[in-house]
Image (cartoon, coloured by chain):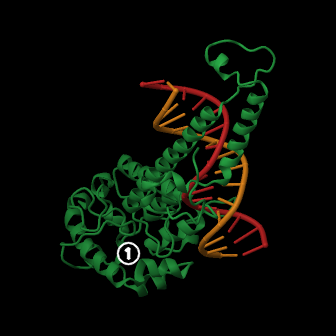
Chain colours: A green, B red, C orange
Amino acid sequence: MLTFDEPPSTQTSSPFRNSWATNQLNVKYVKAEPCRALEDTLESRGEEEERHGGEEDEEEQGVRRRGSHKKKFSQGRMDRVRLRRIEANTRERNRMHSLNSELDILRKVVRATPTRRKLSKIDTLRLAKNYIWALSETLSIGKRPDLLTFVQTLCKGLSQPTTNLVAGCLQLNARSFVSEPGGEAFPLYPGSYNHPRGPEAVGSGSADRPSRSFGSFCGPALYDSPSPDSPPDAGALSPPMNFNGIFSLKHEEPGDYRSCHYGLRYSSVGQGSSADPYDIHLRSQFYQVQEDLNKPFHN
DNA sequence: TAGGCCATCTGGTCCT
DNA sequence: AGGACCAGATGGCCTA
């Protein structure tokens, strides 16, 4: 008979929530309450079995019992079923944890890292899908797309906070490219957006610490070596193309996009995209590398 | 406080 | 038979 040494008071009070330690989950922490229904079922079957005089052996030997067609369980069988259920729960938990860990890697690949809350699962998948789609479209077109079209593609189906996050990463106002309910999106600029000062306006810096980020829109993924803070698989999983040129607006002086009403709806997003001095430092280093690598592309 | 997000449990289905 | 996968149900946490 399995016992629950320490049934947690709530699910979320489990020490394994949001923890890699879940892989080491011990059966004794399995939530007791939901198992009760299963136990009730099994026990009621067990009671019925006793009333019928324990006919499990007959059934297991292939002798069909007349009357009730309900399956009967002995105590031993109940325990086996219960154990299998608990083991299945553990496997399911581990399966979901591995799924979540892969999602975490995906989050890092798209690198749309908000300051306060991580991307939701659904938005991570949507953003990755849109990302691939947008890059594919760009490839098929064969030229630099205009920024707003690209961002509109990226933001299709994303939640408002994530849309704002993308906008924040690109220093745009989300309202400038998100479709109004029942209406079309209205781009701020009908054509392509180029940095007013050209690629030369890109910040300079050393190339020793390139950073792949969503804000910079797929850093030197094809060419760079994994940065020290990259997830183990991020390099291999990174999108294989670099379209930096279209996102050079990120390097504008802050006053520039303020004058263009490129504000952020949520200040937290803005903080995440520009208030972090380390992030700014990384970006300035990274853009120089990106420009060097992308010269052939721009030509 | 409502709604979104999440972890977990559970039973069903499919596959090996 | 047992494992993987899936979707529904449930309840907790967090944010607007």
Q: Is residue A166 left or right of residue C11?
A: left
Q: Position of residue A83 (x, y in %)?
A: 55, 41
Residue at the disc numbered 1? A250
Q: Amino acid at mark 1?
A: Lys
Point out the residue furthest to the top here. A63
Q: Residue at x 59, y 67 (%)?
A: A160
Q: Relative to B9, does residue A225 appear above or below in the rendering?
A: below
- Within 10 Å of disc 1 (Cα), the crowding (few <14, some 14-19, many 20+) is many
Q: Is residue A31 left or right of residue A194?
A: right
> In this view of the protein, which residue sits in the foreground, A58 or A153?
A58
In this rendering, does residue A175 appear at all? yes
Q: Position of residue A1 (x, y in %)?
A: 59, 44
Q: Chain of mark 1?
A: A
In this rendering, does residue A156 appear at all? no
Point out the residue furthest to the right here. A67
Tell me how many marks there are: 1
Q: Relative to A227, does residue A250 appear above or below in the rendering?
A: below
> In this view of the protein, which residue sits in the foreground, A188 or A49?
A49
Q: Position of residue A114 (x, y in %)?
A: 47, 72
Which quadrant of the structure image shows residue A159? Answer: bottom right
Q: Position of residue A293 (x, y in %)?
A: 20, 63
Which quadrant of the structure image shows residue A235? Answer: bottom left
Point out the residue furthest to the front here. A53
> In this view of the protein, which residue sits in the foreground, B10 or A136?
B10
Q: Residue at x 56, y 44 (%)?
A: A86
Which quadrant of the structure image shows residue A131? Answer: bottom left
Could you say whether the residue bearing mark 1 is in a helix, strand or loop?
A: helix
Question: Which image quarter is the C terminus of chain A in?
Answer: bottom left
Q: Is residue A247 left or right of residue A262?
A: left
> In this view of the protein, which residue sits in the foreground, B6 or A65?
A65
